[in-house]
Amino acid sequence: MERTYIMIKPDGVDRKLVGEVIRRFETRGLKLVGLKMLVPSREIAEKHYEVHRERPFFAELVDFITSGPVVAMAWEGNQAITLTRKMMGATKPEDALPGTIRGDYTTSISANIVHGSDAPETAAVELKLWFADNELLP
């Protein structure tokens, strides 16, 4: 059993895609073990995107993710990280295949609906950043 962090970004919330994203993961057989909606602080956004701090688009990422509410989620299941990443689709809209979340709903690399952890180590860090221990189901 593996846990991963998934976030519906401000564009996904604004476009009313929260239910659709959750439906897709639940239908696939993943278990939702943590859920909350919030407008991220700059502090949490900067920590979340720390790996990109030296890149020219860092400020844009932080500005975007703090521009409105996000839905922070923890999902559990067999191979949850690999599975959710495939379901989300490629980051570049032109590479995102139809049937994936990004392939079906986005045309922008910056406003691409969802974020998902890319490795077990990343998932552990992101889950601790976005959730207190008592906010996740055992």
Image (tube, helix red, strand yellow):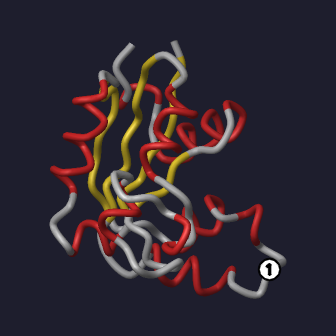
Q: Nearer the viewer, residue 37 or 6?
A: 6
Q: Is mark 1 on a helix, strand or loop?
A: loop
| Image position, residue 134 (x, y; %) | 39, 26
> Is 42 placed above or below 82 here?
below
Number of labels in the image equals 1
> Residue at (77%, 62%) from the top-left corner?
51
Residue shown at the point (15%, 66%) measured from the top left: 16
- Give the image location of residue 44, x and y in percent: 55, 62
Residue for point 31% across, 60% down: 38
| 32 or 85, nearer to the observer | 85
Q: Relative to 45, is 5 above or below?
A: above
Image: 20 above or below 123 = below
Query: 57 or 40: which is nearer to us?
Result: 57
Left or right: 92, with 54 as reference point: left
Q: Quadrant of the C terminus?
A: top left
Outermost residue on the front side: it is 98
* Residue 102 image position (x, y, % from top left): 40, 62
Across and down, in percent, residue 5 comes to 49, 41
| Residue under numbered circle 1 | 55
User: In which quarter of the view is residue 104 placed?
Assistant: bottom left
Decide: is 17 above or below 85.
below
Q: Badge 1, how many Cα within 10 Å: few under 14, some, many 20+?
A: few
Q: What residue type is labelled 1?
A: Arg
Which residue occupies 38% across, 66% down? Answer: 113
